[in-house]
Image (spheres, rainbow, N blue to C red):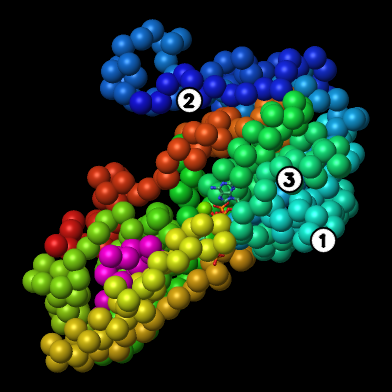
Amino acid sequence: MIGHEDLAVRTLGPCRIDSPLAERLAARETTQHSVVEDDRILFDDTISMAGVRGVPVEQLPSLEPGGPRKRIYFDPAKTRVGIVTCGGLCPGLNDVIRGLVLELCRHYGVRRIVGFRNGYRGFIPHYGEDVVDLSPEVVQHIDDEGGTILGTSRGMQDPEDIVDALERLAINILFVVGGDGTIRGAMEVVRVIGERGLKIAVVGIPKTIDNDIPYIDQSFGFQTAMSEATKSIHAASVEARSAPGGVGLVKLMGRHSGFIACYSVLAKDDADYVLIPEVPFALHGERGFLEHLRRRVEDRGHAVVVVAEGAGQEHIDEHEPGRDASGNVRLGDVGRLLRRLITEHLDDAKVENNVRYFDPSYAIRSVPANPYDSAYCLRLAHAAVHAAMAGRTEVIVARRRRRFVHIPMALAVSRRNHVDPLGDLWMSVLEATGQPVRFE
Ligand SMILES: Nc1ncnc2c1ncn2[C@@H]1O[C@H](COP(=O)(O)OP(=O)(O)OP(=O)(O)O)[C@@H](O)[C@H]1O
Ligand SMILES: O=P(O)(O)OC[C@H]1O[C@](O)(CO)[C@@H](O)[C@@H]1O
Ligand SMILES: [Mg+2]
């Protein structure tokens, strides 16, 4: 069970400097829409969960609220900031970079901001990467484009080398934008910073189109990515309905978590089956997926199947599970497997079929953020700047139950966010598709 110690946020030291934002904060109080800096946000959100702890309300586990502080740790005029984006692309990365730079410059008066190129390798001398000076002029319109103007990469880098680079450039604050791997990397950087007795804040803005970071409502870019995915589901549905025995099969990203598959199917409400990593399924047999699909095609003349890339890995025998440069497991291609098996199964059963396979792949994550995600990215960037200027370190900023909070990095990587097979989301998917609870 999560306790106080899991939620404690590290700070570099006392905040002794008046914030340039102090005047704006004078009239703030905790309301339904804001939480003042010395209040706390309860971790549990049901009476039953809070009740089992059996402690008075002020002793319940709680999170530090995000947002501006009246007094800050860093002197803006003497603060130098670095920004890095790591891991896979995600809509909104440029919005986050832009938001960080604008908030730092315009509201805090920080003038020296650099971007490191191509993820953590941008710190390492032998790659020969330059650093990019980031100013409001440079970032003003970067949100019109997908991707990240800084570039990104996978692959391990030595945290000692990273901290060497921070020291060489006299960086006081490092913002890391990335997923679980990036946050683990940042924790290593924090460890070395501590060993060298440096006062450098490291603040993360969590990024993952898979939505697999825990304890947060939803990661930025997810809404854009799932909206893009609905286009392929629509196309699959049109193809399926337009051919005898039409089967539209769509494979979507989602290594360990099937959120994109679930939400895009709910948005389109055209799919008959959703297969996700969290819910294993049998392929063969009377109650297996293939036989159910055959009946559906015979009854209705067509079907649409959406599969998350991490689903059904146990069915892929010929696959050698290698790892990518960051150590992430390389998945077998469940989409191609299903395309073959569905065709064979319908052929064997003498059911006329036309299987159309869609793999939108990177197309869902390389687009610019939609307006909702852009606004979300900007607010996360603001929260990250407030946290860092107040000397918070080894934290990510996040929105949890619609409140901006600081979550210790260790907690953010302590587990993965999954679609709960017993939860509301999966229930909604089952209702929308009409598929059985299990294929067994
Ligand atoms: N276990 C780890 N320990 C230290 N650093 C790590 C670790 N895993 C990854 N990193 C660092 O973080 C970077 C990004 O990690 P990774 O490629 O796994 O992407 P990610 O941040 O998890 O994002 P995505 O959601 O796209 O997977 C890597 O290039 C590597 O430098
Ligand atoms: O960019 P790469 O290394 O091909 O990684 C693809 C993976 O990255 C993710 O988009 C997560 O960032 C996964 O959904 C996908 O499996
Ligand atoms: Mg990852």
Q: x%, y% of residue 29?
A: 62, 16
Disc with the residue nearer the chain's start (1 vs 2): 2
Please, what secondary structure does the residue beneath circle 2 have? helix
Quick check: 286 above or below 96? below
Tag of residue 162: 3
Question: Mark 3 is on which residue type?
Answer: Ile
Mark 2 surroundings: few (<14), some (14-19) or many (≥20) residues within 10 A? some
- In terms of depth relative to the viewer, which is nearer, 417 or 68? 417
Kindly give the residue lying farthest to the left in the view shown. 286
Question: Mark 1 is on which residue type?
Answer: Gly
Residue 198 appears in which quarter of the rendering?
A: top right
Question: Mark 2 is on which residue type?
Answer: Asp
Please, what secondary structure does the residue beneath circle 3 have? helix
Can you see residue 44?
A: yes
Q: Residue at x 76, y 53 (%)?
A: 124
For residue 136, side relative to residue 437 (left or right): right
Disc with the residue nearer the chain's start (3 vs 1): 1
Q: Is residue 370 magenta?
A: no
Tag of residue 6: 2
Mark 1–mark 2 CB contact (< 8 Å) = no
Question: Label 1 belongs to which residue?
Answer: 128
Please, what secondary structure does the residue beneath circle 1 have? loop
First to last magenta residue range: 302-316
Tag of residue 297: none
Disc with the residue nearer the chain's start (3 vs 2): 2
